[in-house]
Amino acid sequence: MVNGQFSKYMSFRAIKFMTLTFVLIVLVAGLGIWYAERPVRSLKLDTTQLEVRVLLRNLEIPWDMDWSGDGWIWFSEKKGRISRFSPESGELQEIHFIEEVHQSPDNSGLHALALHPEFPKVPYVYVHYTYAPDKGRFVRFSFDSSTGLLEERTVLLDELPASFTHNGSRIVFSPDHKHLYLSLGDALHAESAQDLNEFSGKILRLNVDGSIPVDNPFPDSPIWSYGHRNPQGLVLASNGHLYSSEHGRSDDDELNLIKKGKNYGYPNVQGFCDSREEEDYCRRHEAKVPLKVWSPTFAVSGIAYYDHAAIPEWQNSILITSLKNSRVKAGKRLQMLRLNKEGDKIIGTTDYLVNTFGRLREVMTTPDGRIFIFTSNRELNSNGPRFPYPGDDKLIMLQRK
């Protein structure tokens, strides 16, 4: 074969290879999109039928949400946007954009958001976010209903430990509305989770004005519990218990029952105390063990407590979202964890929406028994295709038919 013919032949082969590669990529991507977006309009439980409906599309990595007494869902998006949405009217309003929010390609940015329990009568909106590669803030805004804007920013905790990942976070309030809890990740400094002079790897407890309660377990400290890796879910249930979900490394995601002043072991203990070294550490430090462990990890994220008669199969249960697949079975899902009467043991689990909408970041229940879920498929560190599915990210509603 002469040189000219050889060059043409090689060019033809290169074009053919690139064409086949492109077609393969399109087919794989299309299959992934079809699989994650296959239509789901209902869920059949034992006796209850649930409607599944997408209410919002094209969000940008939503992280947290809260329900207001006047019927709006308030939510945060990673880039710094705070919005509210009415499920009844379909109206979506952007309320505020925090310009100083710092983002990384991983998951630093605007995280936890919570309304004061008496909102809008008490017009406070609480948020946690990163404003520098290694610093975070816990801030309270005041909502002006006449302008529809957030004003009067008050910094409650400044220069919190942060990193490009492992920042937590969630916010919940005590039943008497006098205190709040804030979960923070270890900011990629595992040893700091055991250091009571550092706030990373902790669950904090504050008065709603940001001051330190006098009955906290450590004098003049907001620390409520310690030894956490990356707690991305937090709920104070009507049964009186505070629960937290926590990312493990490659093994040992955890669901913890949080108690005042207790050590949850990380990094010395991951999951149960099931090695000789961990058993010794747990005995010497009275470390608390999880209610449940997932190994390999599913990247468990937001959690909610469900106890409404609208869905009797889910009464007295924890609902938990997850962000990835494990090595042994499909995992992007909503999982129902049934509790015993006392709320201190998991007595059964059931999976729903497995690999249906992709990564599920947050779940919230409302006083009328509805359930709302955020997807999180636009993140660069997502499992599977490194691009969002059509319409991502989404707000999904589950309600009884």
Image (cartoon, grey):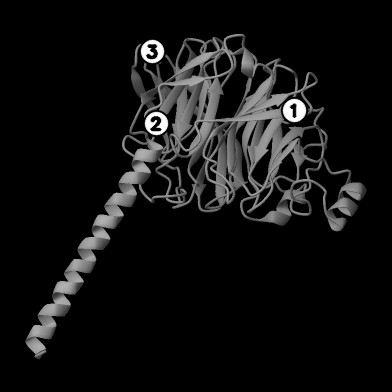
**Position of residue 338 measured from the top left corner of the image (x, y, whole percent):** 69, 25
Q: Residue furthest right?
A: 284
Q: Is residue 307 above or below residue 166?
A: above
| Residue designated by label 2 | 394
For the residues labelled 1 and 2, say whether their Cβ atoms are less than 8 Å apart: no
Please state if 343 lies on the left or on the right of 149 as rendered: right
Q: Residue furthest front?
A: 1
Determine the secondary structure under disc 2: loop
**Position of residue 137 measured from the top left corner of the image (x, y, whole percent):** 56, 40
Please state if 123 lies on the left or on the right of 9 as rendered: right
- Which numbered mark, 1 or 2, is in the foreground of this view? 1
Nearest the eye: 296 or 153: 296
| Residue designated by label 3 | 146
Q: Which residue: 17% across, 68% down?
A: 15
- Which numbered mark, 3 or 2, is in the foreground of this view? 2
Q: Which residue: 66% across, 16% down?
A: 315
**Mark 3 neighbour class, 10 Å CA radius: few under 14, some 14 to 19, many 20 or more:** few
* Residue 347 disc label: 1
**Mark 2 neighbour class, 10 Å CA radius: few under 14, some 14 to 19, many 20 or more:** many
* Mark 1 vs 3, N-terminal side: 3
The residue type indicated by label 3 comes to: Ser
Q: CA distance from mark 1 to mark 3?
A: 48 Å
Q: Quadrant of the N terminus?
A: bottom left
Please state if 346 lies on the left or on the right of 5 as rendered: right
Nearest the eye: 44 or 186: 44
* Residue 48 disc label: none
Q: CA distance from mark 3 to mark 2?
A: 29 Å
The residue type indicated by label 2 comes to: Lys
Q: CA distance from mark 1 to mark 2?
A: 31 Å
